[in-house]
């Protein structure tokens, strides 16, 4: 084997290092592509979060316990605001049941955003519970509840993957075909003393629930661009309280 001394001369090595330097700088200075936000993922899917539906009994849509948010079960509403009804396996097909589960999950995401202010604060969907109103011989409950799970992963990515239960039941409130509930882990607010956190977030959640869908869409901008929020006047002051 011949040994090329010229290849190892200092001048040659220096020249080659200079050729590699721009490539190394680009690798360090060029930031990684920004991951899409949950709201951007929803827009890419052609979806918008609905207004949080009111509770139909003596409960609240969400309860915060530390960094966990427990969301009450949601049953699907149609475009006219009426509850969807029917029994999967008799009145509805498996695909229609999955579509109802997807709508339930959209309503859950709306309730979650109203509680924490921004879906980007969600660290993980911890658990999903799915209840399918179905006939005795229907056994595809997991495929129906996939309508919820698939949407969570599409919107939140890896953070949307979760533990789950899919259960068949004889009936559900208002004759609904599906009910979905979930537990989410969220980021704690920074700069807020622990003793004040629950009061601050409870007040914020109440204000967010009082906003219309258009106001909520605008106020989400406040997390990253407070001066760009188009909510004005008294509504802007209310919106700013959550920062």
Image (tube, rainbow, N blue to C red):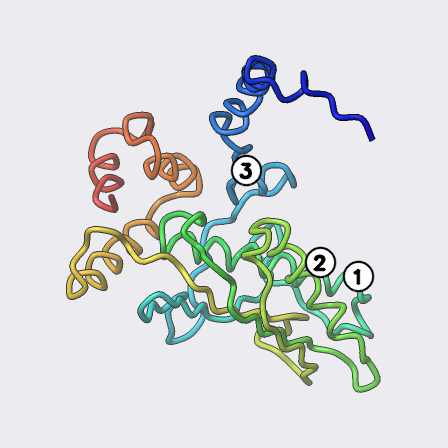
- 64 or 169: which is nearer to us? 64
Please tell me in which quadrant of the rendered image residue 153 appears.
bottom right
Q: CA distance from mark 3 to mark 1?
A: 26 Å
Answer left or right for 74 relative to 198.
Answer: right
The crowd level at tag 3 (other Cα within 10 Å; few <14, some 14-19, many 20+) is few
> Which residue is found at the position 74% from the left and 78% from the top?
134
- 102 or 34: which is nearer to us? 34
Q: Residue 10, relative to residue 189: is it above or below?
A: above
> Which residue is found at the position 75% from the left and 25% from the top?
3
- 113 or 18: which is nearer to us? 18
Are dots 1 and 2 in contact, CB under 8 Å?
Answer: yes
Q: Position of residue 58 (x, y in %)?
A: 37, 76
Circle 1 residue: 95
The crowd level at tag 2 (other Cα within 10 Å; few <14, some 14-19, many 20+) is some
Q: Mark 3 or mark 1: which comes first in sequence?
A: 3
Q: Residue 137, relative to residue 107: is it above or below?
A: below
The crowd level at tag 1 (other Cα within 10 Å; few <14, some 14-19, many 20+) is few
- 98 or 162: which is nearer to us? 162
Q: Secondary structure at mark 3?
A: helix
Which quadrant, please, contains the N terminus?
top right
Q: CA distance from mark 1 to mark 2?
A: 6 Å
Which quadrant, please, contains the C terminus?
top left
| Disc on res. 99 | 2
Q: Mark 2 or mark 3: which comes first in sequence?
A: 3
Q: Position of residue 227 (x, y in %)?
A: 28, 26
Circle 3 residue: 40
């Amino acid at each position: 084997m011949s040994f090329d001394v010229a290849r190892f001369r200092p001048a040659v090595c220096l020249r080659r290092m200079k050729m590699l330097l721009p490539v190394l700088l680009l690798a360090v200075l060029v930031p990684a592509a920004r991951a899409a936000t949950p709201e951007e993922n929803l827009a890419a899917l052609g979806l918008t979060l609905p207004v949080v539906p009111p509770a139909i009994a003596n409960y609240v849509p969400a309860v915060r316990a530390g960094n966990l948010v427990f969301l009450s079960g949601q049953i699907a509403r149609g475009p006219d605001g009426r509850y969807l009804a029917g029994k999967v396996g008799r009145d509805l097909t498996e695909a229609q049941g999955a579509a109802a589960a997807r709508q339930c999950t959209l309503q859950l995401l709306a309730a979650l955003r109203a509680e924490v202010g921004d879906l980007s604060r969600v660290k993980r969907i911890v658990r999903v519970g799915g209840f399918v109103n179905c006939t005795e011989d229907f056994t595809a409950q997991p495929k129906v509840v996939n309508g919820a799970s698939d949407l969570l992963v599409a919107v939140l990515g890896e953070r949307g993957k979760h533990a789950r239960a899919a259960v068949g039941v004889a009936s559900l409130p208002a004759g609904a075909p599906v009910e979905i509930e979930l537990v989410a882990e969220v980021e704690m607010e920074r700069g807020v003393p622990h003793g004040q956190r629950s009061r601050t977030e409870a007040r914020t959640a109440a204000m967010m629930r009082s906003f219309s869908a258009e106001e909520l869409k605008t106020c989400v901008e406040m997390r990253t661009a407070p001066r760009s929020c188009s909510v004005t006047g008294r509504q802007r002051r209310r919106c700013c309280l959550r920062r």
